[in-house]
Image (spheres, rainbow, N blue to C red):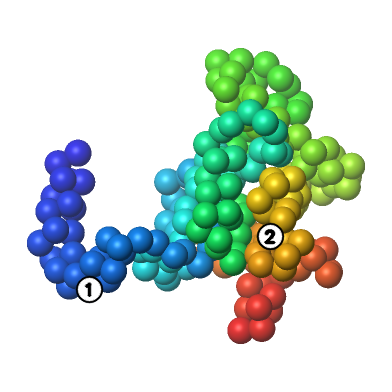
Amino acid sequence: MPRFARGVLKFQDEIFPSRKELFEKLSQGQSPEALFITCSDSRIETGMMTQTDPGELFICRNAGNIVPPHTNQTGGMTASIEFASAALRVPHIVVCGHTECGAMKGAMDLHKDRSSLDTLPHVREWLGFSRAAVDIVDARAAGMSDEERMRMLLEQNVVLQLQHLRTHPTVALRLAQREVQLHGWVYDIGTGKVDAYDPEQDRFIPIAERYGL
């Protein structure tokens, strides 16, 4: 913890003064460009990956970058999605998965053996929101290696969570009004590569190709 405390002091003494104008602007409110939903894995650094400043992303993180389908039961993800969509009116929502995802490994193991997460009952229930992605992999991945199956699961989970997003009333309304766009990404921790989902081709392609960069 002393290392983190020294980091705070460096931020206060060096970083904050050098960006004082930005932080003064942020103190008046926020207007992020995107709701960015990603995994809580400590290896994912959203600002570094997207090269964004504070205030540009409204970030939600959880195990497995999961979006529970909308229900009348209030939860942190549901409330955050509603706020970002209806109050902040973000024009983009990104669901970003990543390689070496422990949550997706857990989802795969859970499908094989429900007792594998007996000591983590809340994790087991949470990963149930990825069950359809696991089922799709089981149906399509005959003959694939474990690595190929996991890559397919990472991608199918992102697509599934995009489907779940559409069940949230505020998102559905803004999609109908063409006021928000949904994006699915998979980030490779080892290479830095990001692939993005192309709904027309129903597959993930390099991010530069997806956005014509």
**Contact, mark 1 vs mark 2 (Cβ under 8 Å):** no
Q: Distance between the residues labelled 1 and 2?
A: 33 Å
Mark 1 vs 2, N-terminal side: 1
* Residue at the (47%, 68%) spot, across then down: 50
Q: Nearer the viewer, residue 48 or 71?
A: 71
Residue placed furthest toward the bottom: 213
Q: Position of residue 114 (x, y in %)?
A: 71, 20
The image shows residue 172, relative to residue 131, as above or below, that is: below
* Residue at the (89%, 42%) spot, across then down: 139
Q: Position of residue 136 (x, y in %)?
A: 84, 43
Q: Determine crowd level at label 1: few under 14, some 14-19, many 20+ residues with C-alpha closer than 10 A.
A: few
Q: Which of 148 and 161 is in front in this view?
A: 161
Which quadrant holds the C terminus?
Answer: bottom right
Residue 39 in sight in this render: no
Q: Is mark 1 on a helix, strand or loop?
A: helix
Q: Residue 213 carries which label?
A: none
Residue 65 lies left or right of residue 13; in this view the side is: right
Residue 114 in sight in this render: yes
Q: Is mark 2 on a helix, strand or loop?
A: helix
Q: Position of residue 112 (x, y in %)?
A: 76, 26
Q: Which of 51 and 85 is in front in this view?
A: 85
* Residue at the (58%, 31%) spot, across then down: 74
**Residue type, numbered disc 2:** Arg
* Residue at the (60%, 59%) spot, across then down: 93
Total marks drawn? 2
Q: Where is residue 177 in the image (x, y as percent from the top left)?
A: 73, 65
**Residue type, numbered disc 1:** Glu
Would you identify the image quadrant in which residue 123 lies? top right
Give the residue at mark 2. Answer: 174
Which quadrant holds the N terminus?
Answer: top left
Q: Which mark is residue 21?
A: 1
